[in-house]
Amino acid sequence: MLDRRLDDRPQLRHTRRALAHPLSASAWKDALEVRRGDPTVAVALRVGFATMLALVGGGLLGYGQVAGFAALGALTSAFLRYEPYPRLAVRLPWVGLGIVGYTAFGAALGAMGAPLWVQIVALSLGSAVAYWVFTAFSLMGPGPVILIFAAAGAAGFSDGWGDAGLVTAAATIGALLGYVIAMLPALSHPHTPARLAVARALAAVSAVEIRGADAVPAARQSIRKARETVALNAPRRPDAHVHELAALLDAAETVLDSGSHDTSRARRDDFSRFEKELRKARRDIEIPRVDAEGRPVLPTPPGFVREGCGRLLDRLVLIGAARIFVASLLAASFAAPIGLDHPLWAAMGAMAALQGLNYRNTVQRGIQRLIGNVGGAMIAAVLLALDLGYWPVVAAAVLFQTLTELTVTRNYGLASVGVTTMALLLTGLGQHAGPGLAVNRVADTVIGVVVGVIVAAVTIRHDDRHHLVA
């Protein structure tokens, strides 16, 4: 009788269906799907270049053992890739500060000789705080898991306060380097973020002809975002190109307002041509003229500080942070007693999975991270077994970081292959690591992903039914 009453509870039924989803064909189909990616070559090359400078500089200066922390700082350049440059200049330093701060935090734990259980609790709490702040302020990119990786690595490396100061200084130099590399294109291609935003909006409107009315809300959202980006990226006295981009958005919105598939079909070829031109990065490209009456009025976007502070108390953001704390704590606490050398990696696995927007996305990311970690660990195990030496490892790390940035918008699993390989190679720079390090990584990831998905299923919202669609 009791079992029947429990079985009738809506939340319990919802949780049980959620737990079954990771084993479904649709979940694995989602995870293996390779999407069309936005232009990422320029961003990938910038991030790879920043990583290379950090690692090469560390090697030449005789600090190869901490160059990995400089490379982590250089990953500042991988965040906020679509932000207009004026806002990027203000927001990106906070990402760099976060990486440096968490590196210093982890290093302090190591220097103090904090017991493993203290490190687990402290970094689980740190995971929740990082997610809370990065989500509230929309600091998009590789995610706050980078901060926890930096903290965990620093805790393992630092045997004293001298080591703590060294890794913090390395991360600081890397973060500054990443910031400069990310901002350099503003000097030669100042309109790039606005052009890409308009290109994505035109592509979204073109999709209406194929997908019909279901694509209209996404297209309107894309136009709204593009208008905001154009306004934020515009100089104080908007030039002709800014007004031209705004006119393209007006034309796109007119197509949506017409409510006619014929109108969309008629403009699709034009939008496709404009989109291709907008995605080119050459300075001499001219966008075909778009007729518009008068000068379009640019909107005044809200300040990101005000928006972010308003979201700090958002219920969903707070719940997400609490879930990450619990999952990170459980995953690391389970990994430590069974003898894994890096239990905090299990916490990172749980955190990475729980960064999904909904339960379906959480499962998708969990599967992708698992597949990517297995693939990356196999590659890293071979490279670590060869004991190549510093410079070949640097070349491999830069290559895999660049490949990560090239694939991250297409499939997170492919990106995870590069992330895992690079992470293991960077970890090996600070210690004499063998293939066993890769095995530990896979085991920790399995624990983290499983715990993360279970916590997500147990705490699933009543209105989260995205996983039931397919």
Image (cartoon, grey):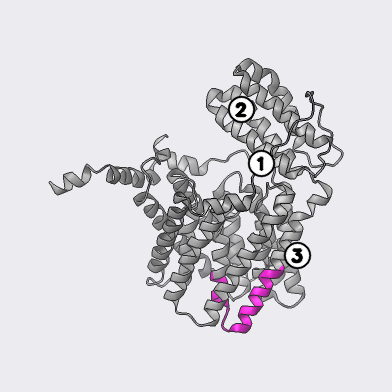
Residue 73 horizontal side relative to residue 277, left or right: left
Residue 239 horizontal side relative to residue 25, left or right: right
Residue closest to the eye, 345 or 220: 220
Residue 97 percent coordinates (x, y):
64, 65
Disc ID at residue 38: 1
Mark 2 nearby-residue class (10 Å; few <14, some 14–19, many ≥20): many
Residue 82 percent coordinates (x, y):
68, 46
Mark 3 nearby-residue class (10 Å; few <14, some 14–19, many ≥20): many
Element marked by disc 2? helix
Element marked by disc 3? helix
Amino acid, disc 1: Asp
Mark 1 nearby-residue class (10 Å; few <14, some 14–19, many ≥20): some
- Residue under the point 70% across and 62% down: 51
Circles 2 and 1, Cβ within 8 Å, touching? The answer is no
Most common secondary structure along the magenta stretch: helix
Tell me, yes or no, if residue 441 can be seen here.
no
Report if residue 130 lies within the magenta region.
no
The count of marks equals: 3
Element marked by disc 1? loop
Mark pair 3, 1: CA separation: 26 Å
Residue 68 horizontal side relative to residue 195, left or right: left
Q: Quadrant of the C terminus?
A: top left
User: Which of disc 1 and disc 2 is earlier in sequence?
Assistant: 1
Disc ID at residue 53: 3
**Residue beneath disc 2:** 207
Magenta stretch bounds: 152-173
Tell me, yes or no, if residue 207 can be seen here.
yes
Amino acid, disc 2: Ala
- Residue under the point 66% across and 48% down: 406
